[in-house]
Amino acid sequence: MYQNQILLAIDWILFTEKLVLIIVVVMVSLFVAMYSTYAERKVAAFMQDRIGPNRAGPFGILQPMADGLKLFFKEEIVPNFSSKFLFILGPILAMLTAIMVSAVIPWGDKLFIFGREVTLQIADINIGILYIFGVVSLGVYGIMIGGWASNNKFSLLGAMRAASQIISYELALGITLIALLMITGTLSLNEMVAQQKDNLWNIFLQPLGFLIFLICAFAETNRTPFDLPEAENELMGGYHAEYSSMKLGFYLFAEYVNMFLSGAVMTTLYFGGYDIPFVNDANLVHIIGQNWVTIIEGGVFFIKICLFIFFFMWVRWTVPRFRYDQLMNLGWKILLPLALFNMLVTGALILLRQNHWHF
Amino acid sequence: MEITQILFWFLSALALFGAIGVVASKNPIYSVLCLIIVFFAISGHYVLMNAQFLAIVNIIVYAGAIMVLFLFVIMLMNLNAETEPMKNVYMKLAGVISGLTLMIVLVAALSHSDSANTLMRPGTSVGLTENLGKALFNQYVVPFEISSVLFLSAMVGAILIGKKDVVKNRI
């Protein structure tokens, strides 16, 4: 055939398929993040016996749009002495690392469209969980660079707090993941979900591990009780004190995207992913067909994530913020030893089971 | 050109530009950011060699942890372009000469090496998690454990140095 067709030998159908999937996933993440801000205010109002936003549209349902428009039309201010390139890079990195997690999460089983089998996962790489861990560990750069480039003592303090907090809690997170990996024996998220479909969910095998993972997820997403990097009453906004307009919007948005995707990760790892509870999915496929099952599974996955988001908000409006030394003590002296203990017990039990419960 | 080849040249160029940026930029913060770019480029090379585990561990350990600590220290020390001490010409000359010497040593070592060692083989699966784990825990288990003990002792040493004053006061 023609020379320039051989030049780039890409499977264009696969390429389009993945591109569409990426756009859909990113759009859904952003949409959920947008409505999380609305949900957060409604939940806060509910907890504090108020009404919450109710002016824009019925039940205030257009409030996030109004907020977004407001952020777009605000004046952009770049502080005079800041490094302009880094100042702009900060929010970009925060958003990028937040969204990159969505690439390896299996959002559902496979669909059959025009005779093609479409997997609802952007990239089924066999190091999926390590990829997530890597991206999460990069998430601190957005905050650090932004906080430093603001050239403001409070911003710098917020950035420092964020960095040390995220590094401290990453350790416990990683060791918890080791215990989980010992049980599943795979790093691929797709296979983990497949295992949980047929057997028990991992939460029943790793209750302590899940608890540690949950606490670390709170710390990694900078949510209350771990929102010291942006503690308003001490740091007047923390690392984003100097930001305005949509750059500030990106930081605030990245937090909600993080919340959504960490909910998705926890669901995938511990709550069976897109598995429909109490139903044998394989039987259901025979009754109503693969496509419908996949759509229902996607919906179930979404409901599970929404429950997690609600939990994040619930905690935010009930638990007060930690003091900084308490935060460090919890991370290093309680969670890390607990995670190690969890890993040891898991390893011992697996060995015993391989030995048919004889010492 | 095939896609892997294009990627190879792109990543190589990225790594080289990043490495030059580390040395050339005045502001230490930019140096660290350039170093992070280098690590990403190297990780890309690992992926091209089908060593996904190495690639992601490289990102987690170097870009995700060590570089964050570098950035942390530099930000706390608040090194700006203005406060940077002037280096004299002889120091720069010495740096260039030693750098070039190292390059000659590396190039000589590579050019005299067996071609099987230097050739990039895309079809291998040595770098996959399972194979790497088996190699580490069967063939190389003793060096692996010794290096982990080394890391542990380094950690204990760091804590000891950090707590020096407290120990003195008690005695």
Image (cartoon, helix red, strand yellow):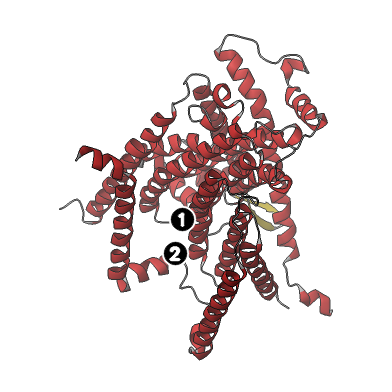
**Left or right of A13, for residue B45:** left
* Residue for badge 1: A187
Q: Position of residue A121 (x, y in %)?
A: 61, 51
Measure how far apart labels 1 and 2 are at the Cα level. Answer: 9 Å
Using the image, determine if residue A28 lies above or below residue B133.
above
Residue A238 vs residue A32, the one in the foreground: A238
Q: Position of residue B83 (x, y in %)?
A: 61, 50
**Left or right of A340, for residue A117:** right
**Left or right of A227, for residue A176:** left
The answer to whether mark 1 and mark 2 are in CB contact below 8 A is: yes
Q: Position of residue B93 (x, y in %)?
A: 60, 74
Question: What chain letter is assigned to the residue under label 2?
Answer: B
Q: What amino acid does circle 1 point to?
A: Leu
* Residue for badge 2: B129
Few, some or many residues within 10 Å of mark 1 (<14, 14–19, 20+) = many
How many labels, in total? 2
Using the image, determine if residue A177 lies above or below residue A225.
below
Asked where in the image residue B49 lies, by quadrant, the reply is: bottom right
The answer to whether one can see residue A189 in this image is: no
Residue A123 vs residue A329, the one in the foreground: A329
Quadrant of the image containing the N terminus of chain A: bottom right
